[in-house]
Amino acid sequence: MAERRIDHVEIEIEGVRRAVAVDLEESPLGWLARRRGRDGRSFVTPVQLIAGERLRADFTRAGLAPRLTANWDAVTRADRSGGAAGLNGSEAALAARQRLSRAMEGVGPEFSGLLMDVCCFLKGLEQVEQERGWPARTAKVVLALGLDRLARHYGLSEAARGRSRARTRAWRATDATNGGEGG
């Protein structure tokens, strides 16, 4: 069995920062983030990867991922899935569904289906292209645009930006010759 590549990505959901484990072998975004184009840049930027994994985390927390077996955890113990403080399991799932819905509205109908397929249902780009009847390598371009819009929805960017012009502040010691308390 091949060794799994787990990476930790820090995301913020509802004001709470968490480290999320990402299985880079499982996630199509992880695979694309490791691949380089002819220009040497990765196909998926770190900000795009964080946005996509944040979407997948909400999808998973919302309980929308298909299950192959019954889930008996809810019967045997309290929710430990990392929901927001003070919320029980169903409230945390509802909050995640609301975040997911807002994200899909934020990216619009042009990108929401593709982002759900790749980020949440973990479909590969070739499969998406085949299902949608798209030409080869089209999904990669559309995915990048969708991830950019998703990152913008989450308030993520490649570089921190502040005010275009900060207020200038000057500090100076008082001078003993001018009646101040010099040091």
Image: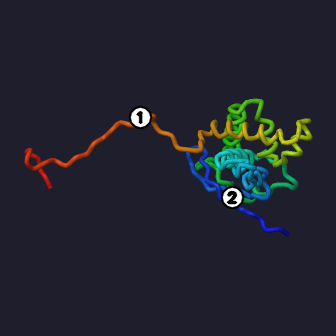
Q: How is the image coloured?
A: rainbow
Horizontal side, residue 17 vs residue 6: left or right: left
| x then y, percent, for residue 136 | 88, 41
| x then y, percent, for residue 79 | 68, 54
Instruction: Rate crowding at label 1 as few (under 14), some (14 to 19) or many (20 or more) other CA atoms within 10 Å.
Output: few
Between 39 and 162, the residue placed more toward the observer is: 39
Q: Quadrant of residue 70?
A: bottom right
Q: Residue at x 39, y 37 (%)?
A: 166
| x then y, percent, for residue 48 | 68, 45
Instruction: Rate crowding at label 2 as few (under 14), some (14 to 19) or many (20 or more) other CA atoms within 10 Å.
Output: some
Between 88 and 66, the residue placed more toward the observer is: 66
Give the residue pinned by disc 1: 165
Cα–Cα gap, marks 2 and 1? 38 Å
Q: Secondary structure at mark 1?
A: loop
Q: Disc 2 vs disc 1: which is toward the camera?
A: 1
Give the residue pinned by disc 2: 21
Amino acid beneath label 1: Arg
The quarter of the image holding the C terminus is bottom left
As drawn, which residue projects farthest toward the front? Answer: 38
Circle number at residue 50: none
